[in-house]
Image: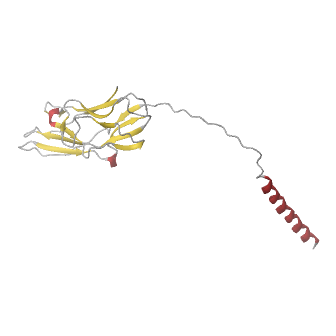
Amino acid sequence: MRNLAKKLFLGMLTVTSLIGLSIGSTNAQSTTGTDVYLTLTGGDLTIEATGSIDMGVLPVSTVATPVEYTFSGTTSEHFVVQDLKWAFSGYYTTIQASNLTDGVGNSIPASNVSLRVDPLNILLLAGSANSNVAFGPSVSTTFTLIDSAITFIKRDPATNNGLTGRYGVLPTLRVLVPAYQAVWVYSGTLTFTLFEN
């Protein structure tokens, strides 16, 4: 019995001591604050586009035939501007198609290649929305020839307001295949270029 009584008594002392610590920890005497500063500097301004697309197979025809390809967000085919620079200087991008050639002397001219964006909006992929990121004046919901460079995505100078973000576009590309075009596999290049201003 003695041993049992001693154990109970020690247990009670332990509880008393925990209660005493809890009461003592709430007696704060004073409080002071420390200001914390963090400066973020601008990063890079970059562009991205998918490596290649396959517009499919088309039989030769006696009439000119349009073939279209709509870039898809599910396969990460956005044309992207990533603006981490935040500076008040602006930028613009251009897009241009080359001739499509078969490697043995035949070609589909770049004047048969056009592009449209429908709906006409720039997608916010990450970061801050910036209403000043816009399309160039030639970009439309109807097809525009891109045999020469057209302004594609842009942000005018002095319009950034410190915002950074990743902005993307999913256009539709059209190639008008001429009547009686020689049979072969044709390939060309879409050139997406960034300029700072």
Residue 12 in percent (x, y) is at 85, 65
Q: Is residue 40 left or right of residue 105?
A: right
Q: Is residue 18 left or right of residue 153?
A: right
Q: Which residue is outermost to the left? A: 62
Q: Is residue 191 left or right of residue 100?
A: right
* Residue 125 position (above or below residue 88): below
Q: Which residue is outermost to the right? A: 2
Q: Which image quarter: residue 104?
A: top left
What residue do we see at 32% from left, 31% from top?
92
Residue 87 in percent (x, y) is at 42, 29
What residue do we see at 66% from left, 37% from top?
34
Along the viewing direction, whichever of 192 and 103 lies nearer the viewer: 192
Q: Which residue is outermost to the bottom? A: 1
Q: Which image quarter: residue 39?
A: top right
Residue 94 in percent (x, y) is at 27, 31
What is the tally of numbered marks visible in this picture?
0
Along the viewing direction, whichever of 156 and 184 lies nearer the viewer: 156
Looking at the rendered image, the quarter that the C terminus falls into is: top left
What residue do we see at 89% from left, 71% from top?
4
Along the viewing direction, whichever of 30 and 134 lies nearer the viewer: 30
Q: Which residue is outermost to the front? A: 30
Q: How is the image coloured?
A: secondary structure
Looking at the rendered image, the quarter that the N terminus falls into is: bottom right
